[in-house]
Amino acid sequence: MADAVNPDEVNEGGVTADGETDGADDAVPADAEEDEPGDSGPDNLAAETSDAEFADRDVTAPRKPPLSHVRLATIAGLALMVALGGLTGWLGFRAYQSHQSEEQRNLYLQVGRQGALNLTTIDFQQADADVQRILDSATGTFYDDFQSRARPFIEVVKQAQSKSSGNITEAGLESATDTEGRVLVAVTVNTTNAGAPEQQPRSWRMRITVQKVEDEAKVSNVEFVP
């Protein structure tokens, strides 16, 4: 007959009467369920994964190859072409401005010279046409003044049967702006009258103001200067 089992021994040894181990020994201790310091929890795992991916990207990311000498030369050439194009355009504009200014100065000088010739070249046989030519090239106050005296002047020229012929000896542009220019003209005038002895040539100096009128230029004032 088997020996009787002491219940106290069973409780202390953890073995039942059937020889099985008590369930209390299989339970996991409470301390064992907590994460040990340094264990990989969800937050730590995510951080490690992110660091690993970042490291992989740093290592495997393609780097831009350095510019070749040919490409650098091409870029430099294009930049030089752009700079030269801008410089050429600026120089062209300056040349155009200079050309326009020179043409305007020549226009003032030409109109001033012609104005002096018109005033000093008058023939009694065509006095009306000569006076009209003066008016056609005049503007402003000079036009108004000369027009008001035109008819009496024509009558005097016809009565005296006067002929005068002017000759420009010297002319120069004294000053010029975008709207007007002043021309100094030296002119020699030969004059004859019916029944009078031949007169000696006279030398006159005139300051003629030329004003731009749209695309033209006309005489706006005449002064006799010593």
Image (cartoon, helix red, strand yellow):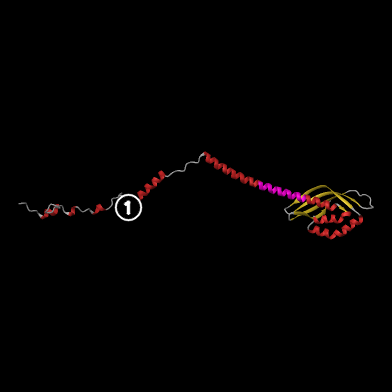
Q: Is residue 77 above or below residue 139?
A: above
Q: Quadrant of residue 8?
A: bottom left
The structure residue drawn at horizontal position 64% and vertical position 47%, both measured from the top left corner, is 90
The structure residue drawn at horizontal position 55% and vertical position 41%, both measured from the top left corner, is 74
**Helix, strand or loop under label 1:** helix
Image x and y of residue 207, in percent: 80, 52
Local packing at callout 1 (Cα closer than 10 Å; few below 14, some 14-19, many 20+) is few
Image x and y of residue 187, in percent: 84, 49
Q: Which residues are magenta?
A: 92-109
Image x and y of residue 215, in percent: 73, 54
In terms of secondary structure, what is the magenta stretch mainly? helix
Image x and y of residue 10, in percent: 12, 53
Q: How many marks?
A: 1
> Is residue 180 found left or right of 52 in the rendered image?
right
Residue that lies at the very extreme toward the bottom in this rendered image: 148
Q: Which residue is mark 1?
A: 42
Residue that lies at the very extreme toward the top in this rendered image: 69
> Is residue 90 found left or right of 132 in the rendered image?
left
Q: Is-magenta flag for residue 94?
A: yes
User: Does residue 99 appear anywhere in the picture?
Assistant: yes
* Residue type, label 1: Pro
Q: Closer to the camera, 215 or 202?
A: 215
User: Does residue 225 appear anywhere in the picture?
Assistant: no
Q: Closer to the camera, 2 or 62?
A: 62
Q: Is residue 63 above or below residue 179?
A: above
The structure residue drawn at horizontal position 53% and vertical position 39%, both measured from the top left corner, is 70
Residue that lies at the very extreme toward the left in this rendered image: 1
The structure residue drawn at horizontal position 88% and vertical position 51%, both measured from the top left corner, is 164
Q: Is-magenta flag for residue 222?
A: no
